[in-house]
Image (cartoon, rainbow, N blue to C red):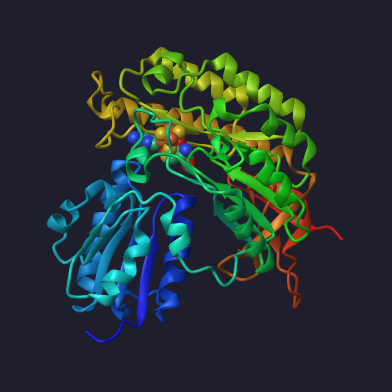
């Protein structure tokens, strides 16, 4: 085969994968390859994958089926990320023409297959933080820079494959993180989003024994003039320590929006999920956050149909959704995953009941979201430009609560990256607004 020239990459799943996808693209570009959106033109094809639910894994294998038929016969094709780690060598059995299978902590080994295209490369090792040092820096940052501050998760919720695919929790050194933050600020970032599976559990002990926490990273980042907005995701309820709650009071650049998944409103279910917090404790944290930052809003993920979930358990989930008034939330049907404890628990819930509960909770969450969106009409919010819509006549901005806000594109002018926007209309999905001088 000739030296590869073009690469195609498709990313599935969470923000961490979006970040990994950017790093993979930068890695290939540093080797002289250029991106293409057309599989048939590509010399290297990468699927950057998510395994969190069975559907996500199936999606990857169907995409591989389509790509095999469209690609050039000599193109290198592989999967990276969580499905690679989930499937391991089985991936080669399911799709014999795969050339490489690289896990979320070993994708920096990609050059090995470029140098030896006639071999098969399998590496799903948990290399910890090795990839961060091995990867070339990004040349330009998008307006929102996603910066991982830890890898993996130690919470081991019984339904979750992430501790298996991404390994044990390791926090990066503050100096490395702040280098990334400064680099992003110098190359175009105006918003920093710190990433971690358990982001608020960030903890780094340096050689002097001093422990560094997320609140410190936020404070240091806020001192950078170019950075106007800061957020972090995803938070574990009991890791929401007082220093972090307090930083919502003292740091105006920190957005008044927090993703803090509760998963279920039933303490029985939470115990079986290995999320051993009480509802009182969770609500107490929400109340403290509201005291520190009265305009704060919370979003959550929910799982319905977890093994053994009764109608009464589900009613408690419905009640807590109303009580907290979550905005921008997601609910999922429980999906049994390999390498997890809940997959072999008794009393798995029939699909029909899961679907019914999903529709019921979804409707309630949508209604809460619609009410919140309507409450924004008349307010003026500082918003960040995301891009233009398909017609090019409208611009899409994000409010501090991540609501999509549509404004008319100003004729001729370059639109401001950050803008004060008066909200004029709203529905369940988005807001309408106009620039305020
Ligand atoms: N803390 C992580 C959570 C990763 S998984 C983060 O960075 O967001 C994202 C969400 O998927 C979880 O919050 C949970 O609601 C859902 N999820 C995880 N495993 C699941 C499973 N087996 N079935 C259904 N939903 C699941
Ligand atoms: Fe998964 Fe629970 Fe960690 S949802 S990522 S094991 S906090």
Q: Is residue 254 visible?
A: no
Q: Give the image location of residue 218, x and y in percent.
A: 69, 45
- The residue at the point 61 percent across, 50 percent down is 193
Q: Is residue 29 visible?
A: yes
Q: Quadrant of residue 36?
A: bottom left
Which quarter of the rendered picture does the N terminus lie within?
bottom left
134 lies left or right of 297: left
The image shows residue 171, relative to residue 5, as above or below, that is above
- From this viewpoint, which residue is outermost toward the bottom? 2
- The residue at the point 71 percent across, 68 percent down is 409
The image shows residue 154, relative to residue 172, as above or below, that is above
Q: Give the image location of residue 232, x and y in percent.
A: 60, 44
| Most foreground residue, 304 or 104 | 104
253 lies left or right of 354: right
The image shows residue 203, relative to residue 15, as above or below, that is above
Q: Quadrant of residue 328?
A: top right
Q: Give the image location of residue 298, x and y in percent.
A: 62, 33
């Amino acid at each position: 085969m000739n030296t590869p020239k073009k690469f195609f990459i498709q990313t599935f799943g969470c923000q961490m994968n979006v970040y990994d996808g950017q790093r993979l693209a930068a890695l290939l570009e540093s080797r002289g390859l250029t991106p293409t959106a057309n599989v048939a033109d590509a010399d290297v094809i990468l699927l950057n994958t998510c395994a969190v639910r069975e559907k996500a894994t199936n999606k990857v294998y169907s995409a591989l089926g389509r790509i095999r038929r469209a690609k050039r016969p000599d193109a290198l094709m592989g999967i990276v990320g969580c499905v690679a780690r989930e499937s391991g060598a089985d991936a080669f059995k399911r799709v014999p023409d795969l050339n490489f299978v690289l896990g979320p902590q070993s994708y920096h080994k990609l050059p090995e297959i470029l140098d030896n295209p006639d071999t098969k490369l399998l590496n799903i090792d948990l290399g910890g933080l090795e990839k961060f040092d091995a990867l070339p820096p990004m040349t330009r940052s998008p307006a929102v820079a996603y910066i991982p501050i830890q890898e993996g998760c130690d919470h081991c919720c019984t339904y979750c494959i992430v501790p298996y695919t991404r390994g044990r929790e390791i926090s990066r050194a503050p100096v490395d993180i702040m280098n990334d933050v400064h680099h992003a600020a110098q190359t175009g970032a105006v918003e920093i989003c710190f990433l971690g599976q358990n982001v608020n559990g960030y903890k780094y002990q340096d050689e002097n024994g001093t422990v560094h926490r997320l609140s410190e990273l936020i404070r240091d980042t806020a001192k950078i003039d170019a950075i106007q907005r800061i957020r972090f995701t995803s938070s574990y309820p009991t890791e929401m320590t007082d220093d972090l709650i307090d930083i919502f009071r003292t740091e105006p650049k920190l957005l008044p929006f927090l993703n803090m998944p509760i998963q279920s409103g039933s303490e029985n279910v939470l115990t079986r999920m290995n999320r051993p917090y009480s509802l009182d404790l969770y609500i107490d944290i929400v109340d403290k956050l509201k005291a520190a930052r009265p305009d704060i809003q919370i979003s959550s993920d929910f799982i319905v149909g977890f093994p053994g979930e009764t109608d009464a358990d589900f009613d408690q989930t419905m009640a807590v959704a109303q009580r907290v008034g979550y905005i921008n939330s997601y609910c999922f049907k429980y999906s049994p995953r390999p390498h997890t404890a809940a997959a072999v628990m008794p009393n798995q819930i029939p699909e029909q009941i899961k679907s019914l509960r999903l529709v019921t909770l979804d409707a309630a969450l949508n209604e809460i979201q619609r009410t919140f969106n309507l409450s924004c009409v008349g307010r003026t919010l500082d918003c960040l430009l995301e891009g233009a819509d398909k017609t090019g006549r409208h611009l899409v901005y994000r409010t501090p609560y991540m609501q999509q806000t549509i404004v008319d594109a100003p004729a001729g002018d370059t639109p401001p990256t950050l803008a004060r926007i008066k909200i004029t209309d709203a529905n369940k999905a988005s807001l309408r607004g106009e620039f305020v001088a």
